[in-house]
Image (tube, helix red, strand yellow):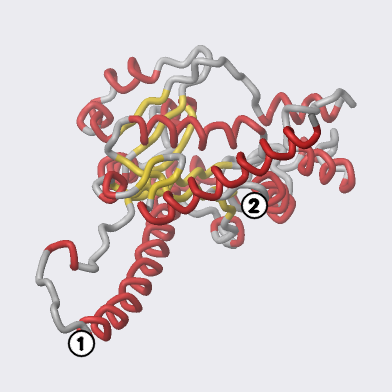
């Protein structure tokens, strides 16, 4: 029986090797590929927020958004970016940015496509979300242009040595630019209606120019909110509402409360994040009082602008 089992393992291993080789030749993978992927718009998902701390639900949002967009047949999600807000946001209980960035990196260290970028969190003052999106869009575009430049040089050399060059569209090395979309929960979408929290021109740019992927939460009514807002209704085709069928109401606020009270938060956070919190004794009654009495940065900025 042991020999039969070993024989089966060898056969299974060879079949997997053949499958990988076929995928290599055809350019296909488990999530689709080949010519079909070339026809889809490449998308990078950007999530901005406190991540105080990052939870499993934050990571789950990326997975839900990717499945939803790719199921439309129009998009291929190639990258996810976590961008923690800087300390200048002045939100109550917001611990230092370097801790939040470190925890986010621990949470995503095993992901093949989600990364953490510390640019926003390293800025001395709070940065408006629209500016953050512009920054990452420029960064992605610059990286793609650099790759295109390298490919163009290689392509020119190859063309010179090929005797029978076929002047066909398939030989065009120009890549279609990756589209950057803001990923958020329904609470962020509904916050567009809070006076002095967002500039109207920023909302128009975020939704109309880049696009929004909104994950529903228990009790939220994103479609109703979009219907009631003239601005969002105008750009409704650029808003992708993703239903979360498995209800999950994990929030960083609830996590911090449990931590302050010495209650378990295991399975709500990645294990590496929980270990980091314990090692550095984060989220205490004292830390929750940070920024108490201060006005949230956007409210302070935009309210002041409206008084001028």
Marker disc for residue 87: 2
Mark 2 neighbour density, 10 Å: few (under 14) some (14–19) many (20 or more): many
Number of marks in the rendered image = 2
Residue 282: quadrant of the picture: top right
- Where does residue 39 sit, x and y in percent of width and height? 24, 47
Residue 308 at least partly seen: no
User: Residue at the spot x=51%, y=34% of the render?
Assistant: 63
Q: State left or right for residue 261 relative to residue 46.
A: right
- Name the outermost residue toward the top: 219
Work out whether residue 112 or residue 246 is closer to the camera in this orientation and state it: 112
Residue 164 position by quadrant = bottom left
Task: Give the vertical position of 231 relative to 249 (above or below).
Answer: below
168 versus 120 height, above or below: below
Under circle 1, the secondary element is: helix
- Mark 1 highlights which residue? 160
Q: Is residue 1 above or below residue 99?
A: above
Give the distance between the C-alpha atoms of the residues marked 1 and 2, in whole angstroms.
54 Å
Residue at screen point 80% across, 28% down: 266
Q: Does label 1 or label 2 sit earlier along the sequence?
A: 2
Residue 117 percent location from the top left of the image: 57, 57
Instruction: Mark yes or no: residue 263 visible.
Output: yes
Image point (44%, 36%), residue name: 66
Residue visible at 35% across and 52% down in the picture? 26
Residue 293 position, x and y percent, is 68, 37
Q: Residues within 10 Å of mark 1 (few under 14, many from 20)?
A: few
Looking at this view, is 284 or 303 the one in front? 284
Q: Secondary structure at mark 2?
A: helix
Percent x, y of residue 124: 59, 62
Position of residue 265 relative to residue 291, above or below, is: above
């Amino acid at each position: 029986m042991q020999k039969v089992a070993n024989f089966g393992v060898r056969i299974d291993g060879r079949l997997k090797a053949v499958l990988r080789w076929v995928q290599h030749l055809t350019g296909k993978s488990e999530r689709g590929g080949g010519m079909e992927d070339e026809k889809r718009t490449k998308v990078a998902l950007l999530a901005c927020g406190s991540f105080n701390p990052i939870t499993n639900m934050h990571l789950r949002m990326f997975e839900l958004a990717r499945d939803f967009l790719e199921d439309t047949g129009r998009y291929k999600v190639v990258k996810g970016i976590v961008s923690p807000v800087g300390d200048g946001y002045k939100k109550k209980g917001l611990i230092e940015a370097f801790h939040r960035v470190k925890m986010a990196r621990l949470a995503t260290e095993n992901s093949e496509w989600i990364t953490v970028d510390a640019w926003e969190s390293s800025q001395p003052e709070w940065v408006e979300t629209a500016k953050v999106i512009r920054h990452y869009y420029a960064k992605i575009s610059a990286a793609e242009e650099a790759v295109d430049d390298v490919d163009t040089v290689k392509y020119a050399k190859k063309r010179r040595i090929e005797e029978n060059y076929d002047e066909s569209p398939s030989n065009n090395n120009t890549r279609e630019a990756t589209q950057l979309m803001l990923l958020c929960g329904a609470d962020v979408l509904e916050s567009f209606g809070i006076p002095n929290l967002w500039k109207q021109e920023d909302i128009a740019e975020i939704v109309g120019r880049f696009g929004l992927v909104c994950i529903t939460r228990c009790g939220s009514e994103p479609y109703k909110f979009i219907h009631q807002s003239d601005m969002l209704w105008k750009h409704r085709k650029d808003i992708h509402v993703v239903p979360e069928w498995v209800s999950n109401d994990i929030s960083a606020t609830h996590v911090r409360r449990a931590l302050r009270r010495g209650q378990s938060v295991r399975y709500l956070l990645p294990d590496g994040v929980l270990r980091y919190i314990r090692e550095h004794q984060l989220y205490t009654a004292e830390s929750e009082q940070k920024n108490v009495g201060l006005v949230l940065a956007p409210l302070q900025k935009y309210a002041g602008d409206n008084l001028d």
